[in-house]
Image (spheres, rainbow, N blue to C red):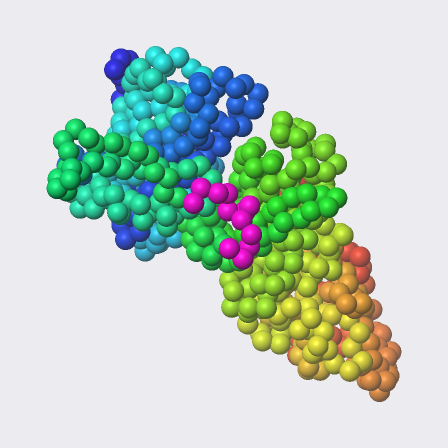
Amino acid sequence: ATKEETLGFQTEVKQLLNLMIHSLYSNREIFLRELISNAADACDKLRYAALDNDALFEGDSELRVEIEHDSEAGTVTLRDNGIGMNREDVIANLGTIAKSGTAEFLQQMSGEQQKDANLIGQFGVGFYSSFIVSDEVTVRTRQAGSEAAEGVEWRSKGEGEFSIAEVELERHGTEIVLQLKDDAQEYADDFRLQNLVRKYSDHIEVPVRMPKTETAKDDEGNEIEGSEVTTWETINEATALWVRPKGEVTEDEYKAFYKHVSHDFSDPLTWSHNKVEGKLEYTSLLFVPGRAPFDLYERDGARGVKLYVQRVFIMDDAEQFLPLYLRFVKGVLDTRDLSLNVSREILQQDPQVEKIKSALTKRSLDMLKKLAKDNEAYQTFWNTFGSVLKEGPGEDASNREKIAGLLRFASTHTDSATQDQSLADYVERMKDGQQKIYYIVADGFNAVKNSPHLEIFRKKGIEVLLLSDRIDEWLMSHLTEFDGKSLTDVAKGELDLGDVEDADEKKAQEETAKDKEDLVKRVKEALSDGVQEVKITHRLTDSPACVVLPENEMGFQMRRIMEAAGQ
Ligand code: ADP
Ligand code: MG
């Protein structure tokens, strides 16, 4: 090895390594899933790159992953003939975490959270999980199509630094040697490895093989010396999961596949697997994660589906196939309607993409509608992704009504901060003669719940939706109707309770207004330019006065957002 160099891991990697080793101890077998997942990705990437340049296969186009072990040496070795890495790739991929927001996220984690495997899992534990079972890890890799002399050897004990050197490598692709810890020797075992491959990697299309050595026996049943023959046996099913008929795929297989495509650590909440033939031809397998990735609100957070064209992997994170408000949906799209040499640029212009996007959007909304039949699961979904879905009515007018049906709100019906009431629930409870759906928006749940604007509604037993998320005012500016009933902000404009109000009250109201004309005049003079209008109201039962915005005025929240944006 020449040009050997020792480099330090990025701080975030050190933190993550530390946390991972402790929090994932009881799940440590997942290292194999992660390494096979990477090897399969590398094979996918080579197959794609070779579409343009067959020479990249270097004469070996039978893509595969091989796993070997040596129980005496205490090692497990994984090998793939995929795309491989050059020196820069190795330093970037196996020395840093590129995702933005990582540092902040790690810093914010409290002591208790640090032990939570699921939180760590949000990063997609990936390659670094090999250190949960290894004292030392050696990676030898060479980029497909490069010279044998351009191989790279990376080595680390996972303790803050790694070494990197130039080596000569005959084969392209990547080989990873794990020197197992004393208490992880169990993995250097045929039976154990085979079970894990079947458990985690059946759904991977690339064959995962292990060597099988057979020794011929003589007539008396004794092994003949020197007759050992080693053959490679494929351990996994090795068919792409989404190609298989729905009925043949088990729940566990779907879950394992989800972990592979999403780089998530925990189970999905639900999924939807569809094969479509006709004008459009595609297969989609979409998942709703059970947890938010830590970068859900990062501008450059990963989103979109894994795109295949006729089974050939094209790209990760193809974001053109789902709207922004469904950015939490993960999965695979395999289609015949695009050409094998599509690029991100072409995707932006291809009219087929718009059609598939609209179809996948409907599929996703239907999947959520189905999920909503299970209250508990849907509540988990809503608490995790509800505020993202609230972007929907503004972004996607064509599906507004569908999205509206999926929204959940806090309400005076329960007076709890939990957002668990649908608009349909509200409509069902509407009073005789009530024509509108009432809501109120403010900063913070306590502020809405105690708003003086609610006094009259509480008195009359009319339900009001209590909105206090940052996005709520934006949402309501796009959601003006549901089920033929208009949505009305109780803090804006004239208060119209429709037929719920009786005629006597109205008359009394008008009389009071007349009586108090003088008072109104004086208050108005006192407040002068501070207000547009002073009026007698029956909004209030306990409070003496409140501020009301004119009907078409921007609300308090929106004003603040616009001000923050410098407008
Ligand atoms: P992720 O798979 O989520 O990107 P990992 O930590 O598992 O994260 O891997 C980091 C990166 O290292 C991968 O994105 C890939 O670029 C590279 N990598 C890992 N294993 C391999 C491999 N066997 N062949 C080629 N590249 C690899
Ligand atoms: Mg990975």
- For residue 111, say whether it is visible: no
**Viewer-nearest residue: 166 or 196:** 196
Image coords of residue 170 (percent x, y)? 34, 17
Q: How many marks?
A: 0
Quarter of the image with the N terminus is top left
- Residue 406 falls in which quadrant of the image? bottom right
- Whether residue 247 is in magenta: the answer is yes
* Residue drawn at (69%, 47%) of the image: 277
Give, as a single range, the part of the protein colored magenta.
Answer: 237-248
* Residue drawn at (64%, 40%) of the image: 335
- Above or below residue 363? Residue 462 is below
Image coords of residue 434 (percent x, y)? 78, 77
Image coords of residue 521 (percent x, y)? 82, 69
Relative to 237, 355 lies left or right: right
Quarter of the image with the C terminus is top right
- Whether residue 565 is in magenta: the answer is no
- Above or below residue 26? Residue 173 is above
* Residue drawn at (66%, 37%) of the image: 336
Relative to 538, 82 lies left or right: left
- Above or below residue 61? Residue 116 is below
In this view, the residue farthest toward the bottom is 504
Relative to 268, 35 lies left or right: left
- Residue 105 falls in which quadrant of the image? top left
Image coords of residue 440 (percent x, y)? 68, 66
**Viewer-nearest residue: 553 or 310:** 310
**Viewer-nearest residue: 68 or 462:** 68
- For residue 277, say whether it is visible: yes
